[in-house]
Every structure is written in structure tokens, then in C-alpha cells.
Image (cartoon, grey):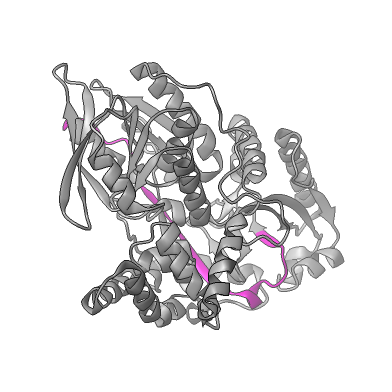
Amino acid sequence: MNRESLLQAISGNNKAYDVVIIGGGATGVGIALDAAVRGLSTLLLEQSDFGKGTSSRSTKLIHGGVRYLQQGDIAMVRDSLRERARLQQNAPHLVRPLPFIVPCESLWQRFMMRTGFFLYDFLAGRSRFPRARGKNAEASREMVSTVRAERLRWGGVVYFDGQFDDSRLLIHMAMSAIDHGASLLNYCRVTGLNSDEEHSVSGVEFVDEETDRRMSVRAKCVINATGPFCDTVRQMDDQSSPRIIAPSQGVHIVLPREFLPGETAVIVPKTSDGRVLFLIPWHEHVVVGTTDTPIDQATLEPLAQESEIEFLLQTAADYLTRAPRREDCLSVFVGVRPLVSPPSGAGEETKSLSRDHTILISKSGLITITGGKWTTVRKMAEDCVDRAIAHAGLRANGKSTVDLKLHGATEAPDASVYGTDETEIEKLVKESPDLGRQLHPELAVRAVDVVWAVRREMARTVDDVLARRTRALFLNRTAAETIAPEVARIMAEELGKDAPWEQQQLAEFGDVAAHFSMPAQ
């Protein structure tokens, strides 16, 4: 993933790409991978960094959707569970089975939960995920010793779903797409759509945000995969296009590991607002989430609302022996869901809006895909490329991503988030032992992680490194801010930047980090 060489290749290419994708989140990168595997010439342009928005701010689950089962959406659950198995098979170094326990306070609740998860496992078909099973009170308390005893009066039901590192998976998808011939560029903002004499979209105009250089590329098909921002691109195509996105934000808080030691997550099956809530061990911390709050407009750096924080803290306190307080929260992160609007006047709540993906083709031929979720991103991409091939008459090779092993994939039980790339990283440390040093005692971030992110993963800013190539900002905001100067220094050396660049990076990172803190009371 070398940004300079990719930009140079684009500037010297006058041919029309088969597919140009706007948006470098999970959906856009998934489409780039699918298109490249099928032999289509592919370019992806992202205005910020890959996964800067929603795709790095998920609940870290690859799952069928317990709540969708409760709502009776059997088809969505079945499809999600099948995709869960494929993703775990194709990226075993990043997607792993994780046990979840549903605390049961009555015999009837335990019976209903056991029955529901029997159906959940049945819909999953054959997979590597173990089947659900009941646990008595004593065994349940051993699994989750910090959950209140009264919540486990009748034990619990243990089921399995997938856990993953979202932005790390996204980077490996991007690397896989490039391995198959696609070009992906971050910090390239699309400023306009070009049309031919028949008023069909024929390419895009974009600006390299690092140099302010303006460029134009031709395309047989342009795909809008900008998630909660897709209405902006649709109106770039046709100013009269109605809004189709009803954005909703989901907030997560991150707590120290002692709040939920062990390797079992907890699911609160029904919160005060009728949702489910997860307490999940992740990277030696605990993630608690999520909320579902309608917002007027999507932003790249959304802020948590005080009511959302209180809801998460209170719900966690209702289940844990030690009630978490605001000062216990190491980080707060917020993602914006691109929910597809219901018909005008339907007045539905956001938790009832469509989570399934939607594909639209405008009169000019712009293809927009939005909605969906991380678990089904492979199928979403496949569906979108199918539509693109049919609409634009593209010639594909018939290949598929169903069984495609992603970059770095390995079955090794102790594999790091880098997968097979860890071998190359270890070589760097062997050549320069100082790169093996840990930058902060509370974060598993090494100097070599910064170097690797710049050299091989197209990291351009301190935010890229501390938020998405490593997960430092998501895990411990204060610790991430502490090591930011050292990260900036290492990056400046790698990128050939000067001291003013370092200072600018630290100021910009400070602005971003402020959004990962508690809202002012």
C-alpha cells in the first residue's frame, strides 16, 4: 500500500476504469476487493482515512443479530450467520468465536433463551462456532465473576458469536484488494462527477488533500459507497435527489479489564429502551455498547450525548458487582449508522429502520449502496458489483470472494492482528531492536507498529496510527495522547517531514482525541 506509487500510476493512466468507488469504509473497500477479484479495473477514493467513520466504531462483533431474531427477521439472521462463518474462515487471524452469556433470572427466561439460541444455531448451519448451551448458577458465576449473583439466579445461556478488530480487518481487506490489482487512495476527496454527452456519469473529479493537486479519472461505472454521507454524493449527481438516510449514532464506553475479567462477554437481552446491550472483552479492555440515538446530520467526529453515557453506565451498573463511574471510562467512541429512511410520514424509530443494504441506480447511472452492517459486507459488495456489471456491461472473470483468504490470513492460534505479516515486522525489529520497544505500559503499541503503518499500510497522520492502525485512541484516550509526540516523531522521520508538521499533527490529533472523552456535564 504505497500512496505515492498509486497516485503516480493514476496520473499516467488515461484509460477509463471499469469501476470507481467513492468511500473507503467497509462497504467501499469490500466492493473494491470484489471487483478486483473479478478482474475489473478498480479505483477507490476516500476523502479521509480508510475506516475513519462508522467502520472503525462498531461494537466489534461479527454476528447474526440476536435482536433481529427477536424481531422475527429470520432471513437477515440466516444470511448474517452464513456470512459470519465465511468471514471467520477467510480471516481467522482477525475474526474469532467468542462466548456470550445471557444471565437468566427465572426458569422461564432461561427456557425462552435456550429455545431462541437453538433456532440461532440451526439457522447458522455448519460452522466452526460452538453451539449454545445452558449453564447453572454456579458455572455461570465462574464464567463471569463480576456479574451480580441475582442476575444469574437461574444461571445463564451461553452462545457463541464472532469478535473482530474492525479497522484492522478493513486494512487487510484493502491490502487484499491491492494484491488483486485495485488502486485505493486515502485523503483524496471527490469534488464532482463528470458526465458524457448522454448525461451519464462518466468519471469523477478529485483533489489530493495532501498536495491540493486536482485530478480527473474516467469510469465506466461510479459507485457511491459513502455510508451516512451518501446523500451528499447523490445530490452532487442530482440536486433534486431526496434524502434517504436517517442517521443514528451508537455510543460505546471503554472500561478497564477488571470490570469483566475472563474471556466471556455478557449480553443484556432487554434494556430500558428495548434494545440489547453488550459488555465485551476486547484487547484487554471492556467495551460497553451501544445506544441508538437519532441525529440530524452525520459528521466524521460525532460526540456522545450525556444521556447516552448515563444510559450505558446505569445499565452496566445494573449487572456488574462494581458500578462503573464516569472517571472509570478510558475512552468513548461514537459511530453513525446509515439507516435507510422509511416512507415519508411513517414516523418509525431508528431501531426499526432498515439495517439491510439498499442499492439504487440514478438516471445518470450513479450506483449508490448504503445500509447493511459489517457482518454482511462481503455479500453487500458482491450484490453491488453484480448490479454494476449488469448496468455498465462490464466483463468479469466469474471469480468470487466466497472462499477468498484475506491478506495475512493464518490459522495459528496465537496469531497477532497482523497475521502472516508479523514475520516481516519481526524482521524489522531484528534489524533495529529499538523498534521493539513498547511506547506506553498500558498500550500494546510498539515503535515498529508505527513504522509498519507508514511503510505498508498507508498511514498518513498520527490519528491514522493511534486510532485505526493501532487501537490506542479507542482503548485509552489519555495514554494515546501521551505517546502522540513520539508517534509524530517516528512518522516525521519515515515521511521526511519537519518539526512544524509534527506540531500540526499533534494539534489535529488533540482535536480528534477530544471527541473520545466524556461529554461535559
Horizontal placement of 173 versus 336: left or right?
right
- Image quadrant for the C terminus? bottom left
Q: Is residue 88 left or right of residue 225?
A: right
Find the magenta span and give its range.
238-266
Relative to the observer, which residue lies in front, 48 or 298? Answer: 48
Q: Residue at x 27, y 40 (%)?
A: 10
Compared to residue 228, the image places residue 281 above or below, namely: below
For residue 282, what is the image quadrant? bottom right
199 lies left or right of 165: left
Q: Nearer the viewer, residue 4 or 161?
A: 4
Q: Is residue 270 visible?
A: no
Q: Is residue 444 above or below residue 185?
A: below
| Spot occupied by residue 30 in the image (x, y as percentages of width and height) | 47, 39
Task: Determine whether, in the image, residue 95 is placed left or right of residue 127.
Answer: left
Q: Residue at x 44, y 63 (%)?
A: 453
Tell me, yes or no, whether the highlighted magenta stretch contains residue 248.
Answer: yes
Residue 301: image location, x then y, percent: 33, 61
Residue 466 location (% of width, % of height): 43, 69
Q: How many marks?
A: 0
Q: Residue at x 77, y 54 (%)?
A: 158
Q: How far across and how far down the image is residue 168, in percent?
A: 51, 56
Q: Examine the rendering and report whether any part of residue 102 can be seen.
A: yes
Residue furthest toward the left? 197
Tell me which corner region of the image, top left, top right, bottom left or bottom right, holds residue 90: top right
Considering depth in this image, is 408 or 222 the residue closer to the camera? 408
